[in-house]
Amino acid sequence: MQPRSRQRIAVDIPVIVTTVLDSLDGMIVDLSESGAQIAGCRLPVRSQCQIDYEGHVVFAIVQWSEEDRMGLRFPYELTDGPLFDRLEIARAARLAPTAFQPRTPGARPAGGFGRRFG
């Protein structure tokens, strides 16, 4: 088994997986330019399908399949379209540094969890 050429990014994208015989609702849970993992549905290994998202179609081949999820390879890498845009947004959010906000001594923490003050 050869290593992946692209890093998968965690996402939650509802899609429709279509074959010659059926249409299934699924959720892309990780995505890269070359493939995806879809939860909530399954097809046999080596099946050809298409992923429908916001009026655009991406062709795919099932690489592995389990009871409620499957891994797909895209024969044509994502380079544009709404799925590619979602991938870029998720990648940018993952790489963006989180803002550090130091706690002021004696200040109450925000929110309603933890110890009660007062």
Image (spheres, rainbow, N blue to C red):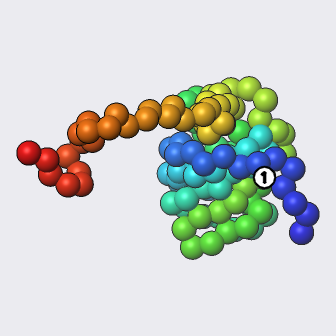
Q: Quadrant of residue 101?
A: top left
Residue marked by disc 1: 73
Towards the viewer: 66 or 16: 66
> What residue is at 71 percent from the left and 39 percent from the top?
58
Q: Quadrant of residue 88?
A: top right
Left or right: residue 92 versus residue 23 is right
Left or right: residue 114 versus residue 93 is left
Q: Quadrant of residue 37?
A: bottom right
Residue 115: x and y in percent read: 20, 55
Towards the viewer: 104 or 9: 104
> What residue is at 67 percent from the left and 68 percent from the top?
65
Where is the N terminus found, in terms of image quarters? bottom right
Residue 31: x and y in percent read: 67, 46
> What residue is at 57 percent from the left and 45 percent from the top?
11
> What residue is at 51 percent from the left and 31 percent from the top?
99
| Three-letter code for the amino acid on which mark 1 is drawn | Arg
Towards the viewer: 8 or 55: 8
Where is the C terminus found, in terms of image quarters? top left
Q: Is residue 27 visible?
A: yes
Say what secondary structure mark 1 lies in. Answer: strand
Farthest-out residue, right: 2
Residue 70: x and y in percent read: 65, 62
Left or right: residue 116 versus residue 44 is left
Numbered marks: total = 1
Q: Is residue 59 visible?
A: no
